[in-house]
Image (cartoon, coloured by chain):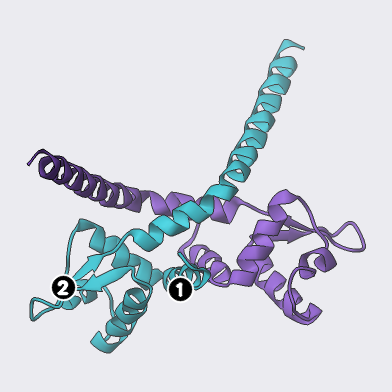
Chain colours: A purple, B cyan
């Protein structure tokens, strides 16, 4: 996946409404009206968000049915997941440091209790 | 982590230069000049990118040394990794469909060879 596709995916995800729309599509295909329902937004505003998601290939709108339901396309998210791989050892390192810190506190508390 | 923090992280990552800067920090702390070196950019342009990464808490600039080295802060990336969890079954489902398709092709090729 090209650098520009990754940028386009990250840009599309940098908005809470667009992330909520994606989340809503995890339960299956939905029409634009279904997707608009939980948000206090105009249809043009929702359509604009859908266009950003579609351009980033995060959703696909069916060309068959007249109401053109939207469907989640997970491939760009998988690309982010793969990009993330190089950083996972840093999460684990942070977690190990936290664990060491908690062990130190427990040891200290044990020592204090024995005094 | 708040919705706005996630948006801020995704926004910061929606740029290939900023992702390259983060990647460069996986090998350790670096000064602004070190980070600027591989890019054909002015120092103010690099500084602007660093400010976006700093605002998103993806990097931290030391206040101790005069040259203020930059350090990777993996916590916001971990938050994205956790957000991604709800979508992982979709990656796996796509992979299963690909595997089924490949099996079908192999079966068909086997049948063709036996004819």
| x and y, in percent, of residue B100 in the image | 67, 29
Q: Is residue A76 above or below residue A54?
A: above
- Say how many tags the image has: 2
Q: What numbered label is drawn on residue B8? A: 1
Q: Report, in whole angstroms, how far the alpha carbon at label 1 lies from the one at label 2.
A: 22 Å
Left or right, B11 with reference to B86? left
- Give whichever of A59, A30 is nearer the camera: A30
On whether disc 1 and disc 2 are found on a single subunit, the reply is: yes
Q: Is residue B9 above or below residue A83?
A: below
Q: Quadrant for residue B1, please give it.
A: bottom left
Q: Residue at x 25, y 71 (%)?
A: B60
Disc 2 secondary structure class: loop
Cβ atoms at labels 1 and 2 below 8 Å apart: no
Res A11 visible:
yes
Q: Residue at x 71, y 56 (%)?
A: A25
Q: What numbered label is drawn on residue B69? A: 2
């Amino acid at each position: 996946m090209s650098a520009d596709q990754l940028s386009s995916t990250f840009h599309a995800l940098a908005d809470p409404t667009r992330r909520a729309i994606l989340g809503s599509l995890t339960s299956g295909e939905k029409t634009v009206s279904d997707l608009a329902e939980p948000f206090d937004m105009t249809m043009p505003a929702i359509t604009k968000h859908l266009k950003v998601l579609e351009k980033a290939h995060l959703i696909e709108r069916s060309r068959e049915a007249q109401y053109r339901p939207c469907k989640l396309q997970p491939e760009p998210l998988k690309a982010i997941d793969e990009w993330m791989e190089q950083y996972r050892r840093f999460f684990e390192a942070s977690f190990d440091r936290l664990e060491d810190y908690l062990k130190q506190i427990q040891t200290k508390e044990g020592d204090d209790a024995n005094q």
